[in-house]
Image (tube, coloured by chain):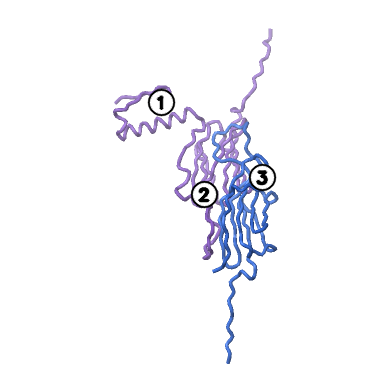
Amino acid sequence: MTTTTIEKTESQVTPAEATWDGLLFRPNVDILENEEELTVLADMPGTCSEDIDIQLENGTLTLYAKVRGRQSASQRYALNEYGIGDFQRTFRISQTIDTKKISAEYRNGVLTLHLPKTEQAKPRKIGVKAVK
Amino acid sequence: MKLIPWRSKKDGGEIRPSESSTSITRFRDEVDRLFDRLFEDPFGMIREPLATPGGWAPTLDVVESDKEVMVRAEVPGMDPKDIDITVSGNVLTLSGEKRDSVEDKGDNWYHCERRFGTFRRNVQLPSYVDMNKVSAEHANGVLTIHIDKVSSAAPKKVTVKPAAT
């Protein structure tokens, strides 16, 4: 239908800014495409909209979210099933995204990112005029 | 009929290899294990499969401090209204359903990693909590439940008075 491609770049390629020594988690994402846009949904509990950083540069989309610590080693854990750390994930996206119209919202721990396609990338229907 | 005294398996409880295969002894072993857990650990977590295959259940942190027991769960993508917190005896139950927010409109999927489904998690709480003082809050996909301890359970300092002479 369209030529839009999206593929996961292996996150072993550590970006320059990741120089802290905290844990880094890879959020689970859903990515869907329709005629209008690509939608990325990422489960990122425990952050807030001010702490989410989204960058699209040279076709590389980076999601980063800072998570404030809520676990401390001095506490007595009866059960400790998950770890706390920042979220980060990188995707490669083709250049058919209208970067000016990208929007994102964060609700109940899920980031929803809308990446609208450029006009050229959208499928178009060509009307045929009847000639008498 | 013979009454068999209960003894922790860890303290050298009897081992009965010859009869361990019959269903009634398996059942007894199961009950023994429940008792072992009950006496060892006040929380005695009811361990169960976290989720059905392909399904989802929240991960939990349970922390005990001087004043309260706190249960924290990561529940991204859930409306707090869809989470049921019930207290029965000393068991706190979290249940609900995480639903996919995306309607199937014939979109093409590139990634499908997020999990959905119904879940139920039981947490056995120690006897010294006040089950009438349970509060819960939800923020950014993280649910926090506070259960106060009964005041008599908090560590108390006893002052020694000099005896009147």
> Against B37, is A96 above or below?
below
Q: What element carries label 3?
A: loop
Dot 3 and dot 1 within a common chain: no
Which chain: purple? B
Distance (Cα) linking label 3 and label 1:
49 Å
Query: Position of B36 compared to B110: left or right?
Result: left
Amino acid type shown at disc 2: Gly
Identify the mark at residue B9; answer none if there is no mark: 1
Q: Measured from the top left, where is residue B149 in percent x and y? A: 59, 32
Q: Residues within 10 Å of mark 3 (few under 14, many from 20)?
A: few
Q: Residue at x 54, y 59 (%)?
A: B110
Q: Which residue is drawn at 66% across and 45% down?
A: A18
**Subunit ID for the residue under disc 1:** B
Dot 3 and dot 2 within a common chain: no
Identify the mark at residue A18; answer none if there is no mark: 3
Residue underneath mark 2: B96
Amino acid type shown at disc 3: Ala
Amino acid type shown at disc 1: Lys
Distance (Cα) linking label 2 and label 1:
37 Å
Q: Marks 3 and 2: which is nearer the front?
A: 3
Q: Chain A takes which shade in the image?
A: blue
